[in-house]
Amino acid sequence: MRKSFYSWLMTQRNPKSNTPVAILADLVFEDTTFPKHTDDFEIISRYLEDAATFSFNLSEFDQIWDDYIAH
């Protein structure tokens, strides 16, 4: 079973980095309502579109998701 997207994303945290994945990781870390226990694209994508406490470029999210799936 694949680890949750949140768990994988937390391995990408780097406050000194300006890469999209590091930025998203820091934003998600601060968001207490992010769906932490899922690896479902639809759930996470819908959350980022409709419920996140921050805004993030969803085309960049798509690339980050592809990287997640590849690992």
Image (cartoon, grey):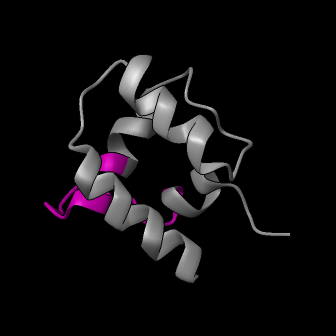
* Image point (35%, 18%), residue name: 53
Residue 2 falls within the magenta-colored stretch: no
Residue 30 screen position, x and y as percent: 42, 30
Position of residue 29 measured from the top left corner of the image (x, y, whole percent):
46, 38
Q: Is residue 23 visible?
A: no
Residue 18 position in % (x across, y down): 13, 60
Residue at 25%, 56% in the rendered image:
60
> Which of the 4 image quadrants contains residue 12?
bottom left
Residue at the far right in the pictured view: 1
Residue 54 left/right relative to 67: left
User: Residue farthest to the left?
Assistant: 18
Q: Nearer the viewer, residue 22 or 49?
A: 49
In the rendered structure, the answer to whether residue 42 lies left or right of residue 39 reads left
- The rendered magenta stretch, by its main secondary structure, is classed as loop
Q: 66 or 7, which is in the foreground?
A: 66
Question: What residue do we see at 28% from left, 24% from top?
Answer: 54
Residue at image coords 52%, 70%: 68
In the image, residue 37 sits, relative to residue 11, either above or below, namely above
| Residue extending furthest toward the bottom | 70
Can the viewer see residue 40 in this picture? yes
Q: Residue furthest front?
A: 42
Image coordinates of residue 51 in percent, x first then y, are 44, 17
**34 lies above or below 11:** above
Given residues 9 and 66, the one toward you in this image is: 66
Q: Is residue 13 magenta?
A: yes
User: Which part of the image, by quadrant, shows the N terminus?
Assistant: bottom right
Quadrant of the image for the C terminus?
bottom right
Region rendered in magenta: 10-24
